[in-house]
Image: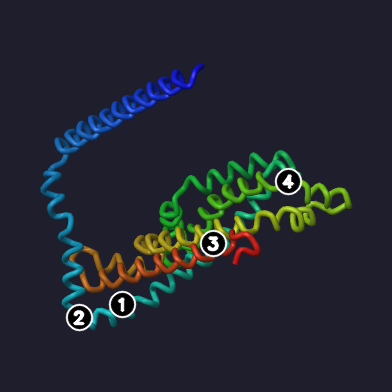
């Protein structure tokens, strides 16, 4: 095939791709319009009328915060203990869930000389642990154990173990087998092979995923507090509850949550970068 014919074929393929992309976008738009029309017919009120009021509540709490003046910062400080409780829930649940995830990951990786029947059992167990959101697990535990931070911690740790176990096992699948084979050739047992042959290879990625999970767990812990699992979520539910609204307090809690998430995000990004950067590139 000549170069000119090849260019002609590439141009034809590009036009075909653009045509299919345009048709796909058109179909999606038609589906959205049809879905909106159906939702509008089923809704008791008008969508556009509700949309106009969308910013009323955020505007109200911002106005309350401005009216509070310098006293707003004193309100912010009042919620710091509740925020610390939320962060503690996230930290403890991340550590416990991460430790369980390491065990699950090593028990579910084929290439690590694990007893074969244990692998599918462990993988299905991790599927179950990931299938249930923290909120559902927390609601069940609150019903059984009562309200407080302990049900939240157990719920977040349970889900974290399943989610991180899956990620850790995928990291294990990509390790270099040569160090493990070398240890096996000198008579090292399974624990020694994993300790000195596998862990040094996977530990940086493990820590990177663990820090990323910590960010997620801070947000999850705040949400769980809203259903009675302790922390700053309890205060948030109180302040925005019907008939008990306190706009300045709600604004203070949102500000604390925003600053916390931003701080955790920046810290974990910095640590992940340091952990994954090759040695000697500083």
Q: Residues within 10 Å of mark 3 (few under 14, many from 20)?
A: few
Q: Is residue 128 left or right of residue 18?
A: right
Looking at marks 3 and 1 on the same chain, the residue that comes earlier in the sequence is marked by: 1
Helix, strand or loop at label 1? It is: helix
Q: Name the residue that disc number 4 marks.
A: 112
What is the C-alpha distance between the residues marked 3 and 2?
A: 39 Å
Which residue is drawn at the image coordinates 28% and 79% (left, top)? 75
Look at the image and tell me whether residue 116 can be seen: yes
- Assign a secondary structure to mark 3: helix
Q: Position of residue 80 (x, y in %)?
A: 37, 77
- Check disc 2 and report the residue beneath it: 69
Which of the marked residues, 3 or 2, is nearer the chain's N terminus? 2
Determine the secondary structure under disc 4.
Answer: helix
Q: What distance separates the C-alpha of mark 2 from that of mark 1?
A: 12 Å
Which residue does the image show at 70% across and 58% down from the upper left? 200
Nearest to viewer (mark 3 / mark 1)? 3
Q: Is residue 29 above or below residue 236?
A: above
Q: CA distance from mark 2 to mark 4?
A: 61 Å
Q: Quadrant of residue 278?
A: bottom right
Residue 273: image tag: 3
Name the quadrant of the C terminus: bottom right
Could you say where residue 254 lies in the image, as x and y percent from the top left? 30, 67
On residue 76, the disc is 1
The spot of residue 90 in percent (x, y) is: 48, 65
* Distance between mark 1 and mark 4 Cα atoms: 51 Å
2 vs 1, front mark: 2
Left or right, 192 with reference to 157: right
């Amino acid at each position: 095939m000549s170069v000119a014919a090849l260019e002609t074929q590439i141009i034809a393929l590009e036009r075909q791709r653009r045509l299919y992309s345009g048709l796909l976008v058109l179909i999606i738009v038609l589906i959205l319009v049809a879905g909106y029309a159906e939702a509008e017919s089923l809704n008791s009120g008008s969508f556009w009328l509700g949309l106009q009021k969308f910013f009323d509540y955020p505007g109200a709490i911002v106005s309350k915060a401005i009216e509070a003046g310098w006293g707003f910062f004193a309100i912010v400080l009042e919620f710091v203990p509740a925020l610390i409780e939320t962060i503690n829930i996230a930290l403890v649940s991340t550590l416990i869930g991460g430790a369980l995830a390491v065990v699950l990951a090593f028990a579910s990786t084929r290439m690590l000389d694990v007893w074969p029947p244990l692998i599918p059992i462990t993988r299905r167990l991790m599927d179950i642990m990931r299938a249930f959101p923290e909120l559902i697990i927390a609601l069940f535990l609150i019903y059984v154990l009562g309200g407080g931070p302990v049900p939240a911690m157990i719920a977040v740790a349970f889900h974290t173990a399943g989610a991180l176990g899956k990620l850790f096992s995928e990291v294990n699948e990509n390790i270099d087998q040569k160090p493990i084979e070398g240890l096996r050739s000198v008579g090292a047992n399974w624990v020694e092979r994993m300790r000195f042959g596998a862990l040094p290879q996977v530990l940086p990625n493990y820590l990177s995923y663990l820090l990323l999970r910590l960010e997620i767990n801070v947000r999850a812990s705040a949400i769980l507090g809203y259903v009675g699992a302790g922390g700053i979520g309890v205060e948030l539910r109180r302040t925005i509850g019907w008939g008990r609204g306190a706009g300045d307090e709600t604004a203070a809690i949102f500000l604390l949550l925003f600053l916390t998430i931003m701080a955790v995000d920046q810290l974990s990004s910095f640590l992940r970068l340091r952990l994954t950067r090759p040695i000697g590139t500083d």
